[in-house]
Amino acid sequence: MGSFPVTARNRVRRLSEKARYEEAAVFSVLDAGFVAHVGFIDRDRPVVIPMLYARDGGRLLLHGASKARIVRLLASETPVCANVTLVDGIVAARSAFNSSLNYRSAVVFGRARILEAEEQRMHALRALSEQVLPGRWDELRPPAPRELKMTAVIELSIESASAKIAEGPPQDEEEDYAIPIWAGVIPIASTLGNPEGDARVPPGVEPSPAILSLAGRRL
Amino acid sequence: MGSFPVTARNRVRRLSEKARYEEAAVFSVLDAGFVAHVGFIDRDRPVVIPMLYARDGGRLLLHGASKARIVRLLASETPVCANVTLVDGIVAARSAFNSSLNYRSAVVFGRARILEAEEQRMHALRALSEQVLPGRWDELRPPAPRELKMTAVIELSIESASAKIAEGPPQDEEEDYAIPIWAGVIPIASTLGNPEGDARVPPGVEPSPAILSLAGRRL
């Protein structure tokens, strides 16, 4: 895999030593999450909406209700910026100035368009399901025609992207190390807990393999 | 507390039964998080950047390096949309169509401006520290003049906002309940782990009360 060319659009300006432009680095952040914050312009104003996504090669796949405003706005090569951020820890330094967060973040710039071909739409819906619940798609009945009609699938081709990865202990001012105060990292773990069946699971029906394989998974 | 008037800007269009316009509901989401996805327009293109924030009354406080592009762009009544989303679970329904996420999300529309008055800036920096690490500010040395000079403080006044809260078990099609498959919720917990001191904590110096009070906290 290659790298995203560094341009005015994707260049990381602050803390540029944490910037990563290789596709592998950007994709690794995108593959770890499943909610993107999608930004677009609506009547000259910015709007940011959280959306489920799947990373599929060099594009993000999104979906929404066919009648949704966002689908109309994202329909025709609309410029979009999507950000995926996973917070890994609180960096408690010896000063407020040097305190910060550890995180993995990817920013993607591209254009959105609606996918119309049925085969592409099904591929995308499966990818969206797999990004959140790997293996679940094949355990479920196929989508009904009515459901497919109600669902729009959006492709965001990644024209430009970068990642920013902050990790490790605090970086304090040299003179602050003389202060006798504890400093370090408080890790943040996002963990999937035990599946909670709903009230209408028939007696004797246990969580499926796809569900069981998720339990305890760390995002 | 009152409610945000429902306008074309903040009206929740999809799944509107999950929409909340009361200040109390919006603020409760904003108070639970500390990373906002901040959207603005840069040269006719949308940009979304994750930023630490503090909610302080009817405004969000942000900060950045004085020389940062984002500070320049957010300087003068720039229209901004900020979104805070906390994902609480994966809703594994009896169909892909009805599978979804449980989440708490708040979207805020406003205008950004730089705060110049020293007292306001210090108030904001303390609030930002408190949003992530309550009690830590008072354990640390005060900010140095050089640090204050390098830091810009941004106020985002909340002109309009809404929250969207998805919770509870799957809502399946009535006929799908006959399918003998497990369905329910896989909870996602974001938890703060055990503090990891860095290599230069002096022997005998233990995590401070502010650090200890965070351990095990759930976001």
Image (cartoon, coloured by chain):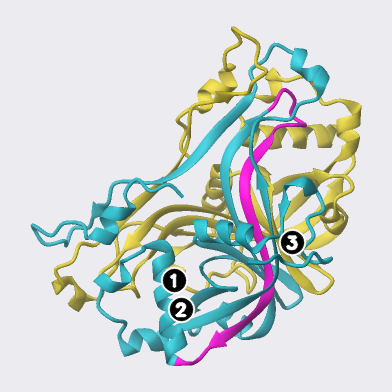
Chain colours: A cyan, B yellow
Q: Residues within 10 Å of mark 2 (few under 14, many from 20)?
A: many
Residue A128: mark: 1
As for residue B164 lying within the magenta part, the answer is no
User: Given contact means CB atoms under 8 Å apart, are the residues at marks 2 and 1 in contact?
Assistant: yes
Q: Which residues are magenta?
A: A93-117
Which sits in the foreground, B66 or A44? B66
User: Given contact means CB atoms under 8 Å apart, are the residues at marks 3 and 2 in contact?
Assistant: no
What residue does disc 3 label?
B80
Residue located at (73% from left, 65% from top)? B47
**Nearest-to-viewer mark from 3 and 2:** 2
Specify the quadrant that holds the N terminus of chain A.
Answer: bottom right
Which sits in the foreground, A46 or A58? A58
Q: Is residue B115 above or below residue B22?
A: above
Mark yes or no: residue B187 visible: yes
Which sits in the foreground, B119 or A129? A129
Dot 3 amino acid type: Val
What residue does disc 2 label?
A124
Same chain shared by disc 2 and disc 1: yes
Q: Where in the figure is residue A44, as x and y percent of width and height?
A: 76, 75
Q: Where in the figure is residue A34, as x and y percent of width and height?
A: 49, 61
Between the C-alphas of marks 2 and 1, the distance is 6 Å
On the picture, is B41 further left or further right than B3?
A: right
Dot 1 amino acid type: Leu
Q: Quadrant of residue B120?
A: top right
Q: Residue furthest bottom?
A: A117
> Quick one: SS at disc 3?
strand
Same chain shared by disc 1 and disc 3: no
